[in-house]
Image: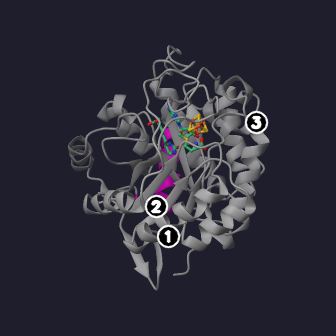
C-alpha cells in the first residue's frame, strides 16, 4: 500500500528550488527515498522490456545536436525508406519471442507527412495484433495525425522534451520547445499515453537537469513513461567530445524522476551499452523500471541480449508481463496514470 509520504502524491506544481533540493540530497538519502517510493507503486523486481525498431532511418532535416540521424552531420548513417509492414511485423514477432512486451517504432522525421500515416497505421495494427504494447516516435504530430494513430491502436506516443527550456536552444534550432509541448497536447487530447523524457550528459548543468524534470512533472498529466537517455556520443555530431556526465549524477536524475513522477515507468534508455552492471543496478535501485532490450537502439548499440539476461539473473529481476483483455493490451501491474483518458480498460 502506498504510504502517505509527500513524495507519493502526484504533483504538477514543482518549483525549481524544490527539484534542486532533491538533487542536492546526499546520495544515500536520495536513493533511499526513491527506492521507497518505487516500492510503493511497483514491484521493484519487475522491469519492463521494450524493443525499439527504426522503421525509417537517417536523412532527417532537423539539427538536433546529439543525433546521428540528422542529415547535416556526417555520421556515416545511411538514409533508408520507410520499411514495409511485413518487415516490421517480422521484427515484432522476433521481439515478442525474445520476451519483449512493448514494441516501439521510430522514424527519423521532423513530422510524418499525411501520406505516411496510413502506412504507419498498418504497422501499428499488425504489431498490436501480436499482443504487444505499441509505441511510436515519429516527430511532431498534428491533432488529426494523433487521432489516426490512436484509431489504429497505438498505445503510446514518444516525444521527448530532451532538455530544460532554457538549454533547449543550445541543442535544437529547427523547432521550438513549444512545438514539443503542442505535440504532447495533441497526443493527450486523443487519449493516447505519452512517453516523454530527455537526454542528460549534453553539457547541461544540474540546474538544467532539474529544469527538464520540473517541466516533465508539471505537464497536465505525468508522462506514462519517462525515458532518461544518457547521451550516446556519435562522431560527426556537434556533441561528440562533450565532457562525460558523472555516473552518480545520472543515477540522481533517475531517482529524482522517480520521486517526482512516482507512478510513471522510468526508462533507463539510451547509453546502457557503456554502463557497468553496477551502474545499471544503481539505476534500478533509484527507480528505473524499464529498458530497451535488443542489440540496437535506432542506429547505435545496446547491450547484447545475453548480457541483459545475465544481468537480470544476477539481480533477480523479472521482465514485466503483459495481459490481454478484450482487445486491450496493458501491463500486468497497477495501471500507472493519474489521468482518466489514459487509463486502460481492465
Ligand atoms: N525524429 C523523432 C523525434 O526526434 O521526435 C523521433 C526519433 S528521435 C531519434 C527520438 C529521441 O531519441 C530523441 O528525442 C532523443 O531524445 C533520443 N536520442 C537521439 N539521439 C540520441 C543520442 N545520441 N543519445 C541519446 N538519446 C538520443
Ligand atoms: C528515447 O527516449 N530513446 C530512444 C527512443 N526514445 C526512441 C532512442 C534512443 C536513440 C539513441 C541513438 C540512436 O540509436 O540513434
Ligand atoms: Fe531528426 Fe529526431 Fe534525430 Fe532530431 S532527434 S535529428 S528530429 S531523427
Q: Residue at x 70, y 54 (%)?
A: 184
Could you say which quadrant of the image residue 121 lies in?
bottom right
Q: Is residue 274 above or below residue 288?
A: above
The local crowd at label 1, few if under 14, some if 14 to 19, many if 20 or more residues have their Cα within 10 Å, is few
Q: CA distance from mark 3 to mark 2?
A: 27 Å
Which element carries disc 1, helix, strand or loop?
loop
Dot 3 corresponds to which residue?
16
The local crowd at label 3, few if under 14, some if 14 to 19, many if 20 or more residues have their Cα within 10 Å, is some
Asked whether disc 2 touches disc 1, contact meaning CB atoms under 8 Å apart, the reply is yes
Residue toward you, 219 or 38 = 219
Residue toward you, 109 or 264 = 109
Residue 214 is situated, as x and y percent measured from the top left of the image, at 71, 42
Q: CA distance from mark 2 to mark 1?
A: 8 Å
Residue range corresponding to the magenta coloring: 31-43
Residue 31 is situated, as x and y percent measured from the top left of the image, at 49, 40
Q: Residue at x 23, y 40 (%)?
A: 307
**Residue 290 left/right relative to 139:** left
Q: CA distance from mark 3 to mark 1?
A: 30 Å
Which element carries disc 2, helix, strand or loop?
loop
Earlier-in-chain disc, 3 versus 1: 3
Majority SS type along the magenta span? helix
**Residue 55 left/right relative to 152:** left
Q: Which numbered tag is attached to residue 334?
A: 1
**Residue 223 left/right relative to 346:** right
Which element carries disc 3, helix, strand or loop?
helix
Residue 155 is situated, as x and y percent measured from the top left of the image, at 54, 66
Could you say which quadrant of the image residue 143 lies in?
bottom right
Dot 2 corresponds to which residue?
42
Q: Residue at x 36, y 62 (%)?
A: 86
Amino acid at each position: 500500500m502506498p504510504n502517505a509520504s509527500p513524495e507519493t502524491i502526484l504533483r504538477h506544481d514543482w518549483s525549481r528550488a524544490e527539484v534542486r533540493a532533491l538533487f542536492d540530497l546526499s546520495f544515500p538519502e536520495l536513493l533511499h527515498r526513491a527506492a521507497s517510493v518505487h516500492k510503493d507503486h511497483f514491484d521493484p523486481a519487475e522491469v519492463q522490456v521494450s524493443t525499439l525498431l527504426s522503421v525509417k532511418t537517417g536523412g532527417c532535416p532537423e539539427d538536433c545536436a546529439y543525433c546521428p540521424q540528422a542529415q547535416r552531420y556526417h555520421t556515416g548513417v545511411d538514409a533508408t525508406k520507410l520499411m514495409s509492414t511485413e518487415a516490421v511485423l517480422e521484427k515484432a514477432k522476433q521481439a515478442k519471442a525474445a520476451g519483449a512486451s512493448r514494441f516501439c517504432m521510430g522514424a527519423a522525421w521532423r513530422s510524418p507527412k499525411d501520406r505516411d500515416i496510413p502506412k504507419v497505421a498498418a504497422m501499428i495494427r499488425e504489431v498490436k495484433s501480436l499482443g504487444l504494447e505499441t509505441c511510436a516516435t515519429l516527430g511532431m504530430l498534428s491533432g488529426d495525425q494523433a487521432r489516426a494513430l490512436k484509431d489504429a491502436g497505438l498505445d503510446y506516443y514518444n516525444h521527448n522534451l530532451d532538455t530544460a527550456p532554457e538549454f533547449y536552444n543550445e541543442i535544437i534550432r529547427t523547432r521550438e520547445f513549444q512545438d514539443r509541448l503542442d505535440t504532447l497536447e495533441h497526443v493527450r487530447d486523443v487519449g493516447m499515453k505519452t512517453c516523454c523524457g530527455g537526454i542528460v550528459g549534453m553539457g547541461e548543468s544540474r540546474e538544467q537537469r532539474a529544469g527538464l524534470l520540473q517541466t516533465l512533472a508539471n505537464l497536465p498529466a505525468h508522462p506514462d513513461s519517462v525515458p532518461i537517455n544518457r547521451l550516446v556520443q556519435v562522431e560527426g555530431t556537434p556533441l561528440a567530445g562533450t565532457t562525460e556526465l558523472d555516473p552518480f549524477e545520472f543515477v540522481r536524475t533517475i531517482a529524482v524522476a522517480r520521486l517526482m513522477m512516482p507512478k510513471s515507468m522510468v526508462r533507463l534508455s539510451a547509453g546502457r551499452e557503456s554502463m557497468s552492471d553496477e551502474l545499471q543496478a544503481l539505476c534500478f535501485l533509484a527507480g528505473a523500471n524499464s529498458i530497451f532490450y535488443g542489440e540496437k537502439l535506432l542506429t547505435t548499440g545496446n547491450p547484447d541480449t545475453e548480457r541483459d539476461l545475465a544481468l537480470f539473473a544476477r539481480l533477480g529481476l523479472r521482465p514485466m508481463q503483459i495481459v490481454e483483455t478484450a482487445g486491450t493490451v496493458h501491463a500486468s501491474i497497477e495501471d500507472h496514470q493519474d489521468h482518466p483518458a489514459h487509463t486502460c480498460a481492465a
